[in-house]
Image: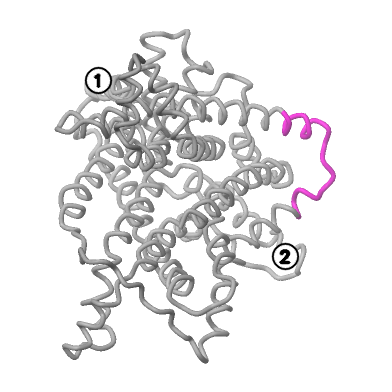
Amino acid sequence: MVVGVFAPLGYLAYFALTSETGSFAFVVRAQTLTAVWNTFALAAAVLFFGTLIAAPYAFLTTRARLRGERLFVLLGALPLAIPGYVLAMVWLGIGGDYGLSQRVLGVGLWRANGFWGATLALTVYTFPYLFLNLRAALTRLDPSLAEVARSHGLRGWALWRAAILPQVRAAYLAGALLVVLHVLADFGVTSLMRFETLSFAIYRQAQGAFDRTYAAWLSLVLVGLTAVLLFVDMRFLRGRLKPVSGATIRFAPRVALGRWTAPAYLYLVGVIGFSLLVPVAALFLWASQPPEFDSVISWKHAMRNSLVLGVGAAVCAPALVLPILRVSVRREGLWARLLERIPYLGYAIPPLPLALAFVWLTLSVVPDLYQTLPLLLAALLLRFLAEAVGPIRSLLMRLPERVEEASYALGFGWLATLRRVTAPLLRRGVLIAMAFVFLAVVKELPLTLILAPNGFDTLATNVWTHMEEAHFALAAPHALAILAVAGIFVTILQFGEQEQK
């Protein structure tokens, strides 16, 4: 697994450094600096506007006395089922002189594109990460700290800064890291919106055959920025975020909103309408046009291929993760901790550089493996193996070690114990892990677009292909199929989490 990640990246670095233009000065030029600046500016804007949406939404669904909390929580999480490139497609097609709004309502709207268009699509797509993390922290808010702060005369913002923010800071930073990583890795939104970020520049250089060496250098820059971000998070942020209270937590009472009740409901409904109802309605309007026969066949093939990839990755991921987690949970020490972090290696690498690294490595070493289904499945597993870690690890940590010891005492070996004792007891965690991986693979675009065999179209790649030609009606059925599959899984997982609580 480690070799599977570092071999392609190692070859990517070798390709960049040994080329005729293989010097760092080749990268430090205006075009690269502009792409880096645009990437950071987009990440900052998405994080800012996402916080403005997610923070009030999380507060209202956890601390306020409102009816329908579970429904609002579910609807607040469902935008995760809509890939960013689908949202970009929707907002591109709604505005403008010939957009959906003008044709259906007779009202011309701003046509999303460039920086603000990418900010809009990525904010709607990523704000649930902030919302779910903040909600988890606010649900377990300890009121005793606020009471101590009031006893010292603190009120208003001073009270929030002293007693509330320290309790939600870790959760917010965890969500913020996910948002920024998604913006750094995004390729579909920025490409459709024609906004020059590092990922968009990499794709144009690599696919256009303008300069493969420059694409390799840009990929290394993007991987380096991601590595720095993860290091800062691990070294300087997470290490300083300690639990604020070791005592038994007494949950804070709900807040009565009074005259603010109606505005609160309007806000919640507005967020749901903007992030969920409008995109879904637009897709249904486009899909309602009479389909062509060829498009129906294309949709069926794409659905089948997406299910093949999703099921294949979902079945393989727990089988790869379980032995690693079993050792890391049951053993102590440096090697056990390092072993546990192996699945995160592929997740930390932006997908576009990872895909290009696989392309150039296979073409140089094993050309017959290029654009084959096994290569695509291996890349998807490396990318999304981390999705399977959390659900399995949480149950494995609660599994009594004496259960496995009893199996050993009866004469069963390590592999037999894992298959006949450990795995059945972890069934719920394994199923959730499979759902996470399946959902991620069905929505995935860059790896599939670059590594898929010729003629192997998926729902995601068909959305992309039709959108490049501005065929909204042809792209809509594929996008709705992604939403349907992903929405079902998000709903099941969200209700499962609430039932477990």
Q: In the drawing, what numbered circle is on residue 14?
A: 1
Residue 355 visible, this angle? no
Q: Residue at x 46, y 11 (%)?
A: 369
Residue 130 visible, this angle? yes
Q: Regarding mark 2 in the picture, which secondary structure is present there?
A: helix
> How far is mark 2 from mark 1, CA to CA?
52 Å
Q: Which residues are magenta?
A: 285-300
Q: Position of residue 51 (x, y in %)?
A: 39, 66
Residue 26 is a magenta residue:
no
Inspect the image, locate mark 2, and give the three-letter code of the amino acid beneath it. Gln
Q: Is residue 248 above or below residue 312?
A: below
Residue 292 is a magenta residue:
yes
Q: Position of residue 57 (x, y in %)?
A: 47, 70
Q: Is residue 50 above or below residue 356?
A: below
* Residue tagged 2: 102
Q: Residue at x 14, y 32 (%)?
A: 334
Q: Is residue 252 above or below residue 122?
A: below
Q: Residue at x 42, y 56 (%)?
A: 129
Other residues around mark 2 within 10 Å, as few (<14) / some (14–19) / many (≥20):
some
Other residues around mark 1 within 10 Å, as few (<14) / some (14–19) / many (≥20):
few
Q: Residue at x 37, y 65 (%)?
A: 48
Q: Position of residue 468 (x, y in %)?
A: 60, 40
- Residue 111 located left or right of residue 393: right
